[in-house]
Image: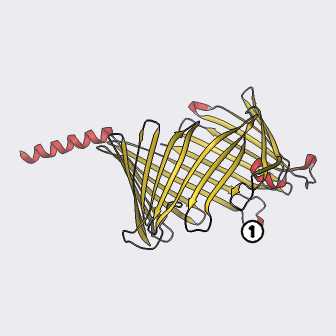
Amino acid sequence: MKRALVLTFVLILGLGIAASAQIKGQWCTDVVIDPQGTGGVYFTSFASTLSVDYTVGGWTFNSKSTFALTGWTGQVFNVNGTLGAFTIGSILTFNPSTALFTSWKTTGSVSIAGVTFDGMWLLMPTGSGFTLGASGASGPLTAAAIAYFNVNPTTGGLIQSSYCVCWDYLIMTFHFPFCCVEDVAMAISFSHAGFDYVSFSVVGIPVPGIDWLTLSAALKFTPGTGVGKLLTITPTVSFPVGCFKLYSHLDTTGGAFPGAGDLVINGLSIDGIALTCTIGGVKFSDYSSISPAYNLTITGDAAYWEKFCIESAADSCCGGAFTFKVCMWFTDQSAQLFDLGKTTIALSYGIGSNFTVKSSLTVLSTGVTAWGVGFCVTF
């Protein structure tokens, strides 16, 4: 009788948990084919991603698998949730092709009386490290401090191949108003060798009479480096936003003290211009680069100085969505009409809310170089 009661209790509890649980995911696959078979290769790209989420009791468990032409290329397990007052997240990565563990990173945080305490632990095949931090605010002052144990503050990776508890850095940051400056950022760094540096920085300093020009200033004191004090002033150009966008930069000389001379603005260089607008649900855009050095920044491809795009989006069948985009790139070295160098076409069509098919086409002056097909299934 007792065994039957226990079994009934477990069954009821299990059904309750199952009723509150949820499984969802997405599978997306894209294949790119070169019809010309350049170098004897027709299938130039294959990318497939399967992501599955299991949510129960405020926790989400995720598995993400990636596949390419070479096979199973990546596997990531991720979990996020709350445990009492603690917020916890953990991510575990593997390299399936070599059957090797890559990294395990776990973060946690809790807020007590207006102060947030957080930490991170990183485990890799070559070693481990962790961080401990705290942050909070009092009126206009915000402060934070993070201690790094065998963790690089810049890259977030390990400093050395070791599993020891090795303290390396303590970095404290502050934000506060001062005089007419609304936000002064201050940072103090200590390393295992002692005092490292202290820096002060402000952004958005207005220049009288020039609304489109602001300055940022940073003052850094670093003892024992032969420089001591370094003052850097950086100008920023920001023109009014409209359907036209002007790409530009300031030609300057100097800007750092000592030894580099005063900050001299020699001129304003116009690198390109863009026009974007929407007419009747269709978005039109044109990007023109004046300087070849800025082609990549403006048109997205260093080989082309101008890009012209038309795109639209609408509803498709049964709750799905339809998107279409065609772009044409132009160059000064093309024998085609209007110096057309490249054309790309991409479309997606949703068949219901759970299934989307995709297709793309890339055409150069030599012919069709890429045909892409793909799909996404959500469940």
Residue 216 locus on image (x, y percent): 65, 46
Farthest residue, direction left:
1
Q: Quadrant of the N terminus?
A: top left
Residue 352 locus on image (x, y percent): 56, 35
- At numbered mark 1, what does the secondary structure look like: helix, strand or loop? helix
Tell me: residue 292, above or below residue 310: below
Asked if residue 219 lies left or right of residue 174, the reply is right
Farthest residue, direction top:
280
Mark 1 burial class by Cα count in 10 Å: few <14, some 14-19, many 20+: few
Question: Closer to the camera, 24 or 242?
Answer: 242
The residue that appears at 75% across and 50% down in the rendered structure is 297
Question: Closer to the camera, 281 or 260?
Answer: 260
Question: Closer to the camera, 12 or 117?
Answer: 117
Tell me: residue 9, above or below residue 292: above
Residue 371 locus on image (x, y percent): 72, 53
The residue that appears at 42% across and 40% down in the rendered structure is 137
Q: Quadrant of residue 318?
A: top right
Residue type at mark 1: give it. Gly
* Residue 27 in view (yes/no): yes
Residue 73 locus on image (x, y percent): 53, 63
Mark count: 1
Asked if residue 257 lies left or right of residue 303, the reply is left
The residue that appears at 86% across and 48% down in the rendered structure is 290
Q: Residue at label 1? A: 40
